[in-house]
Amino acid sequence: MNVAQRFRMRADEVGAVRAEIHELLRARGRTSCTWEVGTHATPGNLVERLLALGLVDDDPFPLAVGMVLTEEPLAAPPSIEVREVHTDEERLASARIAAVAFGSPLPTELPPREADGNNVEYLALIGGRPVARASGSFSENGASLFGGSTLPEARGQGGYRALVAARWAEAVRRGTPILVTQASPMSRPILAQPASARSARSASCSTPSAPEPLPPELPRP
């Protein structure tokens, strides 16, 4: 997954920035990129300008909400086991769950092993079967939550809630009880349960296929 974010530019720079980012992607053989446009991004109509340059709204959720949790979230259901991902079998199961949830091709090879001990991957299991996965990036300021995804047939059973609880527990163990994430409409109700949850909005759009240079007839704003 390739993500561009934290945009601060003038209106007359949008076309050049788009071209520069896509050139970097092409040089690395990357075929797509998500542009996450926060509330304070400039120019103020950046999403509209990017759509005019050929990007498309993310499907199915073009709007994410950034959230901060500073109180303990809902407890995990007792029927769900959460474990850190270590074995090759667990890594492949995690990658396949993410692919199903995000509509990507199923992986046939193991993803690269994470070398940074502050980036932790988790699986949630029901009856011994992996049904959900998520990652947490831990720092001295708290934990960032990434990649929460649940198999469609297992949704509504508490898998995602259990993964949030596990990452909160690890953040507490490290002495940094703060979680931050970008929430879709599916995860937002779960994350909003603690009274301390706070939010900010972020629009999201993507390159629809392999990034191409701007056509010469398309004006740069």
Image (tube, rainbow, N blue to C red):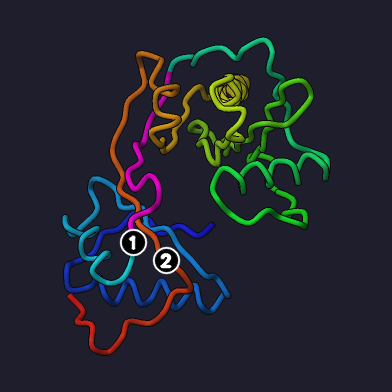
Crowding near pointer 1: few (<14 within 10 Å), some, many (20+)? some
Magenta segment's dominant SS is: strand
Which numbered dot is residue 121? none
Point out residue 57 in the picture as x, y percentages from the top left corner. Answer: 33, 56
What residue do we see at 38% from left, 82% from top? 213
Q: In percent of the image, x 41 and y 35: which residue is there? A: 183
Label 1–label 2 contact, CB within 8 A: yes
The span from disc 1 to disc 2 (Cα, nearest Å) is 6 Å
Q: Residue at x 60, y 15 (%)?
A: 76
* Image point (23%, 48%), residue name: 40
Provide the residue span drawn in magenta.
Answer: 56-70
| Horizontal arrangement in the rendering, residue 181 relative to residue 10 (left or right) | right
| Residue 189, percent from left and from top | 40, 23
* Relative height, residue 164 to residue 213 (above, below): above
In the rendered structure, which amino acid carries the disc numbered 1? Val
User: Is 58 colored magenta in this rendering?
Assistant: yes
Q: Earlier in the sequence, mark 1 or mark 2?
A: 1
**34 left or right of 160?**
left
Look at the picture and state if 82 lies above or below 38.
above
Instruction: Give residue 208's mark.
Output: 2
The quarter holding residue 129 reads: top right
Which amino acid is tagged 2? Pro
Quadrant of the frame with the N terminus: bottom right
The numbered disc on residue 56 is: 1
183 vs 96: above or below:
above
Q: Secondary structure at mark 2?
A: loop
Asked whether, in this view, residue 4 is left or right of residue 203, the answer is right
Q: Residues within 10 Å of mark 2 (few under 14, many from 20)?
A: some
- Mark 1: secondary structure: strand
